[in-house]
Image (tube, coloured by chain):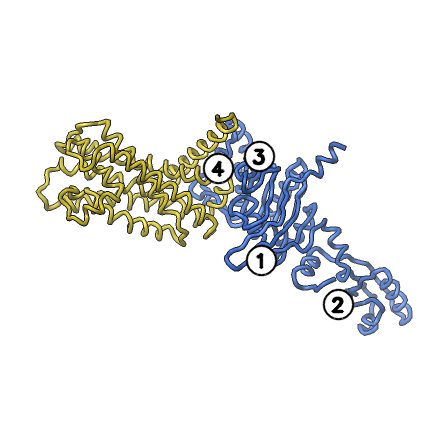
Amino acid sequence: MSTYSDRNRWSRQLHGSLVILKKNVLLYYLKPPVLIFGVLFPVFFFLAFKMGRNVPPGAVVPGMVAMALWFTASAIGPLVTPWERRAKTYERLISSPISLRSILAGDVLSGFAFGCAISVIPVILGLFLTNAEIANLPLLIGGILAGALSFSSLGVLLSAPPAASPSNIMLLSNLVRLPLLFVSGIFVPIAQMPTWAGWIAPLSPLSYASALIRASYGSVSYFPVWLCFLMLFVFTAVFFAASCRFHRMYRAKGL
Amino acid sequence: MIEKAAETESVIKVNSLTRRFGNLTAVDGIDFQVNRGEIFGFLGPNGAGKTTTVRMLTGVIEPTSGSATIQGHDIRGESILSREHIAVVPEQANVYLDLSVWRNLMLMAELYGVPRNRRISEGERLLDALGLMNKKDSKARELSKGLKQRLMLCAALVTDPEVLFLDEPTSGLDVQSARLIRKIVRELNNDGLTVFLTTHNMIEAGDICSRVAIINNGRIVAIDTPGNLRSMVRKRHYVEAVFRDQTPPLKKMESLPGVTRVESDQDVFKLYTETPGSVATLLVVLTMDIGLELEQLNTRKPSLEDVFLYYTGDGGSE
């Protein structure tokens, strides 16, 4: 049975996470690395994929939404902690009465909110500029929310290693994010990929988010919908638990 | 009696606190207590373990062994509760450069859960007290180092801490900022705030600290009031003499019983001794014997800097 002080403690920590979210919105949403790797990257990938190919515009919208979500939701995490370490603001943050878990939860929420907000743009553009139609709006919303949570947690996990410069962590994050992009059914449906890629696809959270988003636009999902949601929540839990562990391990490094 | 008990209540208790980094023992089983309402100075040369100690006490790093409590809360088992009582101005920390002065202040207050009305009124009061009101809407990156440090202090104080950790708060600051920070710290201490101050500035430590601990190679080598520390290091006591017109031969002064060495700085002579009273008397007799006139004669305790040097490698054992 929870006591008043337990509830009070939880609400203080939740409040702390929301303050971290507010700080991140004010400080990091418009930082160049976020805009370059979170917004411009997916746009240019989309253009590179679309140009010169005879693909109906509406058919690329689900992939575009999934890709935008992937890059944006996972863009905030790799920036925040390395930036704060370099700017010497991190020590003050971790000496506040907010647990490291709450600080990281705030970072996850920051990526989550950023990813959800930006991925609405290709959804709207797809509706107005292409023949893409949303067949199942709740599924699309659920896919975006679950995917954003998972990708954002991955981003926070990637920010754990101490680095001399935030760009080192952005490089590391791209080393992880780019290969997964190509095996997750964004450009080519998983069913049409080579056998080896089909084996790797289930290891990527993007595969499940992509499958959900495709299904919401009326395609047949490669994975069952329930499995997609389950796997995205499992990925979120694993990434977040690993983030807490590694951030704790490295928290005093590079101060 | 109750008031007396409250005065000596320990706010920070440290027992056998140790921190190792690989093979290096940065802090080696230190013990001390900080009483309520003290300004406790923590002195030591670079690499002695000051910042590591502060980082352990403020929850930034975990001790390898030993324990410590802040307001009765264990820094490991009740880390968050212990941190609710403190505010920190770390040595190398910075404010958020892309946020305004006011936003920086409010962000820190929000993080500590200070209610809205209170954080606004306290924030304005502190900006005014630390001369930052006219910079309220400026970006923090536009501030000088001294003004940034004042903002750091504001951001720490707006959380209404019971214990304030200051790690080299005036290092490298302009005279005005350093003096203002010292003045504010003194005033806050008079109002009951407990301050844990690490500094290299011996004058500052001697001037404002109730007690000081000296840490060297990860171990506490001395802990007492500045006055008592100065009295304890007997080899650093000296007799200071200024003579009119002529000076007695250096060899004669060195041969006086009890004098360990003589230093001269222009016309001021320092005769180091463990028995300054008797050496002063002997010096008067000597000057009379050789027909000289003393202009000034004083017995002096060592400065806190002398004490610090004595304990950290320049003095040998007592």
Q: Chain B: what color? A: blue
Labels 1 and 4 positioned on one and the same chain: no
Tell me where residue B56 appears, x and y as whole percent. 55, 47
Label 4 packing within 10 angstroms: few (<14), some (14-19), many (20+) = many
Q: Quadrant of residue A237?
A: top left
Labels 3 and 4 positioned on one and the same chain: no
**Label 4 is found on which chain of the structure?**
A
The first of marks 3 and 2 along the sequence is: 3
Tell me where residue B54 appears, x and y as whole percent. 57, 48
Amino acid type shown at disc 1: Asn
Q: Which mark is residue A98?
A: 4
Tag 2 near tag 4, CB within 8 Å: no
The first of marks 2 and 1 along the sequence is: 1
Residue drawn at x 77%, y 33% as measured from the top left: B1
What residue did someone put label 2 on?
Answer: B264
Amino acid type shown at disc 4: Ile
Amino acid type shown at disc 3: Asp
Q: Is residue B185 left or right of residue B231?
A: left
Q: Which mark is residue B46?
A: 1
Asked if residue A42 can be seen in this view, the reply is yes
**Label 3 is found on which chain of the structure?**
B
Which mark's residue is nearer the viewer, 3 or 2? Answer: 3
